[in-house]
């Protein structure tokens, strides 16, 4: 695969793909991505509980589930 060879990427390598200004940019991942890394890069507004989430959070248990 000439394009992968030219980029120094082999089948099975882990890559990060992002879109910027109408281009796809593929880079090798040289360290494992952790949940902490993913969360740090997430927009802060994505962590806000929506009204429907809060309704579910506020609901009391109705069966034998453990409520902490």
Image (cartoon, rainbow, N blue to C red):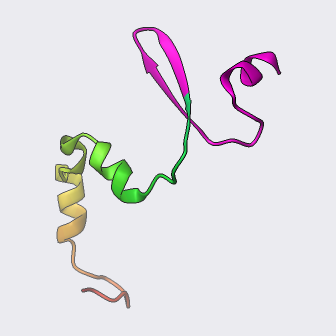
Relative side of 50 to 24, left or right: left
User: In the rendered image of this protein, does residue 3 appear above or below residue 45?
Assistant: above
Q: Nearer the viewer, residue 30 or 24?
A: 30
Q: Quadrant of residue 29?
A: top right
Position of residue 6 measured from the top left corner of the image (x, y, whole percent): 72, 19
Return the x and y of residue 57 as percentages of the image width and height: 22, 67
Q: Quadrant of the N terminus?
A: top right
Q: Is residue 9 above or below residue 34?
A: above
Q: Which residues are magenta?
A: 1-26
Q: Is residue 53 left or right of residue 65?
A: left
In the image, residue 57 sits, relative to residue 46, either above or below, namely below
Residue 53 vs residue 6, the one in the foreground? 6
The quadrant in which residue 11 appears is top right
Q: Is residue 19 left or right of residue 50?
A: right
Q: Residue at x 40, y 9 (%)?
A: 21
* Residue that appears at 73% across and 24% down: 4
Q: Position of residue 63 (x, y in %)?
A: 36, 86
The residue closer to the viewer here, 47 or 23, is: 23
Please tell me whether residue 22 belongs to the stretch shown in magenta. Answer: yes
Q: Residue furthest top?
A: 22
Give the total of numbered labels: 0
Name the quadrant of the C terminus.
bottom left
Identify the residue shown where x is 17% and y is 70%.
58
47 versus 8 height, above or below: below
């Amino acid at each position: 695969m000439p394009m992968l060879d030219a980029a120094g990427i082999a089948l099975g390598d882990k890559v990060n793909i992002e879109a910027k200004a109408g281009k796809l940019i593929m880079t090798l991942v040289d360290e494992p991505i952790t949940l902490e890394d993913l969360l740090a890069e997430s927009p802060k507004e994505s962590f806000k509980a929506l009204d429907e989430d809060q309704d579910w959070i506020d609901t009391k248990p109705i069966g034998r589930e453990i409520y902490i």
